[in-house]
Image (cartoon, rainbow, N blue to C red):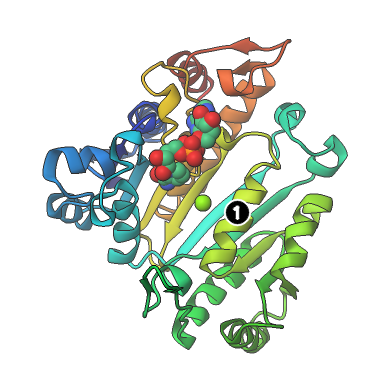
Amino acid sequence: MEKIITVLPGDGIGPEVVASAVKVLQVIGKRFNHTFHLNYAAIGGAAIDQYNNPLPEETIAMCEASDAILLGAVGGPKWDNNPPALRPEKGLLKIRKHFDLFANLRPVKAFPSLLASSPLKREVAENVDLMIVRELTGGLYFGEPRKKTDAGAIDTCVYSREEIERIVENAFELARLRRGKLCSVDKANVLDTSRLWREIVEEKKKQYPDVETEHNLVDSVAMKLITNPGHYDVIVTENLFGDILSDEASVITGSLGVLPSASIRGDNFGLYEPVHGSAPEIAGQGVANPAATILSVAMMLQYSFGLKEEAAEIERAVAAVFEDGYYTADLAQEHTRTLTTEEWTEKVLNEI
Ligand code: NAI
Ligand code: MG
């Protein structure tokens, strides 16, 4: 198989963790006989410095000519006081919107060897294997009108039927590929957008009789994710709820540094990135945990290229290195060996 991938390293630890993930991709290519062509472009703060634009035309054009995008992270104190249009995260919002990447997939799966770092009791966290499907291009983040004056401010939550239908379908399909359970999260006791959301899930579920479907209010799910996270398989929800719940779910496993994500749109194209940010305070020290970005490459292989065996091999290798007791500094404990980003990546490469 031959694929073109645009690589957007971004800011802070972005370039370091992306370099690791690219090495893994290349080793997978060698072992399974695939050719991955990599093209590099700028996004975020790096793009602001170079082009005075967090998402330059050159970057968009390169992404348009590729089969998938691998992204590090954006942002840092250097750009914190920039006007809104010249902020690194604007590049992220724009790229998702430009490519209509409406579904954000965040798997949260416990690695047994990492559970000591989880704030939850081992017996609560150990069975966690869930996927949050967050709507990414609608809702409060994009709704008009929006306005802020000293006297008051307004944000608007807008969802069209079509926007809800496509994300809900996506989630049903994913549930079917997993354990066949779907939890739709809303605030239907208060919000009209949520009431429409619930109606559409009810309509769609007729096409998926094999999927066990439930509705739950977002405040209740916020509690249950902590008390009984093992209950969930696929969780589907709108943009803001998904943002909050996915950050909440991210602590279950004990480290932000191991969580991958995919942003997809129903065809094979997708953007893959770690859940964490650019961690500016540890950038350039060679200590960042590259696991989240490496696992994002596994998601790319699976969801954009249909390479399931290759994806599983990456997941296996990462788990094996943890099992062997090798960790980066963020996960280090008394009885473990602490490796640099490059050393830890080398272990994964050898494992593959
Ligand atoms: P962060 O995720 O960058 O860092 C949170 C904490 O986790 C820090 O203590 C950091 O050192 C640690 N951490 C994160 N990833 C790590 C890794 N791979 N290995 C080891 N430790 C890791 O979030 P924070 O601190 O809120 O934001 C820092 C910058 O990143 C800000 O400019 C923010 O806007 C940006 N950001 C970017 C995102 C993106 O590009 N998707 C997402 C979240 C934040
Ligand atoms: Mg967030």
Q: Residue 4: x, y in percent?
A: 25, 46
What residue appears at the point 23 percent right and 49 percent down from the top-left corner?
A: 54
What is the secondary structure assignment of the residue under circle 1? helix
Quarter of the image for residue 184 reads bottom right
**Exactly how many numbered labels are in the figure?**
1
Disc 1: which residue: 246
Confirm whether residue 314 shows in the render: no
What residue appears at the point 35 percent right and 60 percent down from the top-left corner?
A: 96
Q: Is residue 328 above or below residue 77?
A: above
Q: Is residue 127 above or below residue 325?
A: below
Q: Is residue 149 left or right of residue 276?
A: left
Q: Residue 198: x, y in percent?
A: 65, 83
Amino acid identity at mark 1: Ser
Looking at this view, is 223 or 252 the one in front?
A: 223
What residue appears at the point 27 percent right and 65 percent down from the top-left corner?
A: 98
Confirm whether residue 207 shows in the render: yes
Q: Residue 42: x, y in percent?
A: 21, 41
Looking at this view, is 349 or 286 the one in front?
A: 286
Distance from mark 1 CB to nearest ligand 2 atom below 8 Å:
yes
Quarter of the image for residue 77 reads top left
Q: Residue 144: x, y in percent?
A: 37, 79
